[in-house]
Image: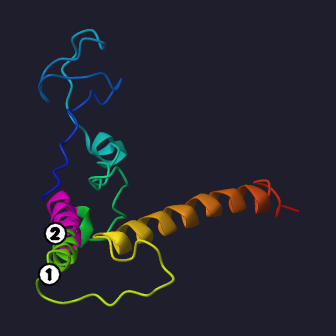
Amino acid sequence: MKIEVKPRPAGCPRCGGPLEDPGASCPRCDGVPAARSEEAEAAAPAPAPPRRPHGHRIPPGEAPRWLDDDANVRKLAFGVAGLAALVFLFDLLDLLGFLYHKHTHEGIPGEDWPGFYPVYGFVAYTLVVVLGMGLQRLVRRPEDYYDG
């Protein structure tokens, strides 16, 4: 994905007003023909650096990275989803008696259900995130805590 920076339209070097053509007369300067001077070229602001797709600016001199391209993010997301579907398919095939036999433990109820471990992992991860948010509220300090 190539990020293009569109140049700003040329402005009047005297008043900074917008011009339709670089050689046209400026409506703010009483019709005096506006010419771009070297001082005006030097004083013109530099074009803004290109932005990453998620809104952050790419620092000057830094090339876009692999995950800055939306197509690569989509590929990664579909790859992870496909891998999860494949693991679930193997678990479902086990339920039907194909491929392998899962040896379950006696003390864990529901371990023999298809999709038990993915659901168990999702619930555990969600619980860790929710408890982490509560812990953050408990140990949070004011923004200027370390300022003298």
Kindly report which numbered mark, 2 or 1, lies closer to the viewer in this rendering.
Answer: 1
Q: Quadrant of residue 59?
A: bottom left
Locate residue 137, reporting x and y percent: 73, 55
Q: Which residue is mark 2?
A: 82
| Residue under the image location 23 percent in, 71 percent down | 84
Secondary structure predominantly adopted by residues drawn in magenta = helix
User: Are discs 2 and 1 less than 8 Å apart at CB?
Assistant: no
What amino acid type is highlighted by mark number 1? Gly
Numbered disc total: 2
Foreground pick, 146 / 121? 121
Is label 2 in a helix, a strand or a loop? helix
Query: What segment carries the magenta color?
Result: 69-84
Quadrant housing the N terminus? bottom left
* Mark 1 surroundings: few (<14), some (14-19) or many (≥20) residues within 10 A: few
Q: Is residue 81 left or right of residue 60?
A: left
Locate residue 131, reporting x and y percent: 64, 62
Which label was assigned to residue 97? 1
Which label was assigned to residue 129? none
| Residue under the image location 34 percent in, 26 percent down | 16
Q: Quadrant of residue 57?
A: bottom left
Foreground pick, 121 / 37? 121
Whether residue 75 is in magenta: the answer is yes
Q: Quadrant of residue 38?
A: top left
What amino acid type is highlighted by mark number 2? Gly
126 vs 36: above or below: below
| Distance (Cα) linking label 2 and label 1 | 22 Å
